[in-house]
Amino acid sequence: MTAILANIGRNVKDGLSGAGRGVVLLRAIVFATRQFWKMRGEILEQMHVVLVGSMPLVIVTSVFVGAVTAVQAVYQMQAYVPMKFLGTVISKSVFIELGPVLMALVVGSRLCAFYAAELGTMKVTEQLDAMCIMAIDPVSYLAMPRFWAAVLMIPVVTIFCDVIAIVGGYLASVVTLDVSSGTFIEGLRMFYKHSDLLGGLIKSVVFGGIIAMSGIYYGFNTKGGAEGVGRATMTAVVGSCLSVLVADYLLALVLFQIIFEK
Amino acid sequence: MGAQFDIPALPGQRVADPAAFQGVVVEGVSKSFGAKVVLNGTDLLIPKGETLVIIGRSGEGKSVLLKHIVRLLEPDSGRIWVEGQEISRLGIRHLMRLRRRFGFLFQGAALFDSMDVCHNVGLMLKEHTDWTDERMRERACECLSLVGLDGAADKLPSELSGGMKKRAGLARAIVMEPEYILYDEPTTGLDPITGDAINELIIKLRQELGVTSIVVTHDMPSAFKIADRMAMLSSGKIVFTGTVDEVRQTDHPMVRQFIEGNSQGPLGAF
């Protein structure tokens, strides 16, 4: 019993200490943002990694998300709800929830793993130490560009996802589910609100920050050799996914009060 | 060979006023990783302009000691001064300014994978000078030439052999003409001819530029060639310091066992 309590206590202590170090890292990144213009080349390069590198994944995921949502909605609605609401259901689901969350989980995991593995390898091969010796701050040079690339580009990826998922939903509805094009578009327009799109994008900005912080934090704190890099990458992705889901719930509570309700 | 320095020859001695000492003072530094005590009250003085070679068995904490001198690691206890500045008390800006005066050759070279050799060598110039790209490239190529890597500027680190990586790391360490260079096994993995060329370069840097060098090595011919003074680290403490002649002539059992490469003796075999 004592051992179990000691173990719980140790885990809580480690968790709090990790959270504290994460906050210190975030503060350092915010501080390093003064060098945003100087590091613009690196930031653009990282934005390219997020956007262009993720596009095949975004396209495939989004098309099928839209299509599956259409199939599920038609199945649920067929006896009770007029099909003119199909477009509404798909657009609301995608804009508010599916777009931001799925992109944070799918593209975010890819990005988080990339950051953690890249920075973790640099850590275990002493490249981060070499940078420190050269009087170059790894937070300014490595962490800050990656953080802002994720924060700025995950919403852009989400917009792509929203559009492609609507197209996927439209094609699935019209081609396979016998819903007319006019009916689908009417539903899409009927209850469309900018606030739905905006709320989803606000979520994706926060998710971008969570994804970047998780990858950077675990990368910078990697210990050991190849196994350490593997463990750091796995922990970063799991931590990122769980944090995104918790943040999604908390943001939903807040955003429904101040944005979606309007 | 080498210059003469007014330095305590016995282990454990310290200067009265570390803040007034021109060079590096390591005073009572201890460091543990978990239960393993690596440094246990290490004292060491390195006067400016000297080449000090630190010898000792693998895993005795020589590289850890080097990393403490540039505050890549923080001691559990003890203090380190560099030219009168206690580095553990320096703010980040002052520390960065101090580090610009150092070059560090890592055991595994620690080249940046994503950059070609020229950018690796020139990165410090890019960050800390307002030189043009042409001038930076020229200086990087000049340093690469000094270590025998002409023509390797556009290669990626993954295209280099271990020895070439080490030489590229050395070119990177000297590119800003630092006052202090810390070498972690500079000749390990090099063929004897290249190794000797690196030894000559270390000597040349001291003679022509007055560079203070701290070298960690197991390569005894290299140590005898480049050292002004040698220090032996064992069980977390400096157990012997002396000039090359003193090391050659000493009866200290640990030093004798080490320089003779004898598996029988106080250091043990494993």
Image (cartoon, grey):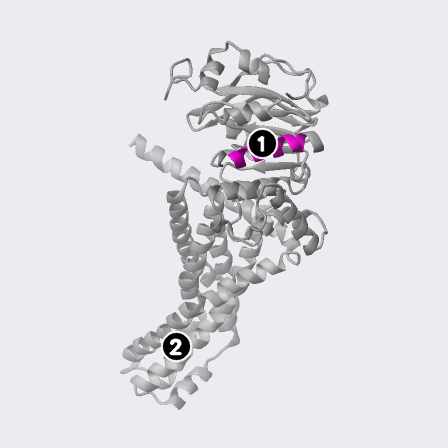
Left-right relation of B20 to B115: right
Q: Residue A48: percent from the left, percent from the top?
A: 52, 64
Q: Residue B211: percent from the left, percent from the top?
A: 67, 31
Magenta segment: does it hold A251?
no
Between B262 and A124, the residue placed more toward the observer is: B262
Q: What amino acid is found at the position of numbered circle 2 in the picture?
A: Ile
Left-right relation of B113 to B132: left
Q: Residue A51: percent from the left, percent from the top?
A: 49, 66
Residue at (50, 11) in percent of width and height: B252
**10 Å crowding of disc 1: few (<14), some (14-19), many (20+):** many
Please state which of the two labelled residues, at mark 1 or mark 2, is closer to the viewer. 1
Q: Chain of mark 2?
A: A
Left-right relation of A83 to B203: left
Q: Which residues are magenta?
A: B193-206
User: Residue B199, which numbered label?
Assistant: 1
> In the image as oriented, which residue stretches furthest toward the front?
B193
Q: What amino acid is found at the position of numbered circle 1 in the picture?
A: Asn
Secondary structure beneath label 2 = helix
In this view, A227 is above or below B20: below
